[in-house]
Amino acid sequence: MNATRTRGLSIALAAVLSILFVCEWLVAQPSSKRSLPALTSQADFDSLAVTYDPDTPYALPHVLFVIDRKDKNRIYYVNTRRYAFHKDFVNGTYLSLERGREFFENNYLKPNRRFIMGTLAYQTPVKRWTFEFWEGDLIPPDQIKLAHDIVNKTFFAPVAFKPNSIRQDEASAQLEGMQRVLQSDIAREQEFRHSCRTSICWQRAPASRTRISRTRRNSSSNTMVGGWHSRPNAIATPSSAPIWIS
C-alpha cells in the first residue's frame, strides 16, 4: 500500500513539474498573436516590440505596422518578434501573395499602393514616439498624413513623423497638424562624452544605427536581397528593408 501511494505521489509530482516547465517555456516564447489593431498601453507595445541596443542611451524599441488601404485603412501593429519584415507579415497572414520585385514596386514605389508599411519607435534620446518609412519609399504626402492620423488614433501616446529622406522631409514639411522629429533633432540629443584628462582628447560618437551587414548586393546589378540598406546619418530599422529578387 505504501509503495503504491509513494508511486502515485511521484507520478503527481512529476506531472506538476512538467506543467511548470511548460508554463515557463511558454512565458519565454514570443507572443503568439500575429498583430493587434491598436496599442492602447505600454504593455501592448512591449508585447510586440523588439529593442535594438537595449539598456543603452540609444535604445530603440520599435514595432512594425501595416495599413491596408484596400480594407478601409485597417492598421495592423505587427508582432515584430515574430515577423522581422513587413513582407513576411503580409505574406504570412495571406493579405497578399505578391512577392519579390512585384511586391516591392507595388508597395514602395507606386503612389496607388495597397499597403502603407512603416515602423513605430520610441526615440530614447529625445523621449518621443515617432513613425517612419524606409528612406527609399516614395510614399506621397497624402498617405504620410493618412498614416499619421491612423497611428495617432490607435496608439496610446502622441506620435510624430520622422522623415528618413530629403523627399520625405519636403513632402511632409507643409502638412498641417502633424508634428515631426528630424534626425538632426535626435543627433543633437545623443550623448557625447568628452575627456581631456591627458593631452589627447577623445569623443565617443553615438552608436550608429546604420546596419548594412544583412544587405547583399548582386554583383551584376543593384538588386538588394534580404536585409537593410541605409545611408550614413539615416536610422535604419526594419521598415528600411525592401526585399526583392530579380
Image: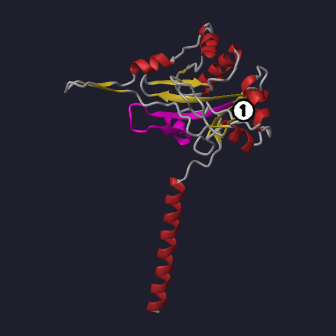
- Residue highlighted by disc 1: 221
Q: Position of residue 58 (x, y in %)?
A: 42, 31
Q: Is residue 50 magenta?
A: yes
Q: Residue furthest front?
A: 220
Query: In percent of the image, x 51 and y 79: which residue is there?
Result: 11
Quadrant housing the C terminus? top right
Left/right placement of residue 54 relative to residue 222 reads left
Q: Residue furthest bottom?
A: 1
User: Which of 223/89 is in front?
Assistant: 223
Q: Position of residue 37 (x, y in %)?
A: 65, 34
Res 244 quadrant in image? top right
Q: Where 161 falls versus 90 (above or below)? A: above
Colouring style:
secondary structure
Q: What residue range appears in magenta?
A: 42-66
Q: Position of residue 78 (x, y in %)?
A: 63, 38
Left/right placement of residue 25 relative to residue 241 reads left
Query: In percent of the image, x 49 and y 31: which residue is there?
Result: 209
Q: Where 246 falls versus 127 (above or below)? A: below
User: Which of 186/42 is in front?
Assistant: 186
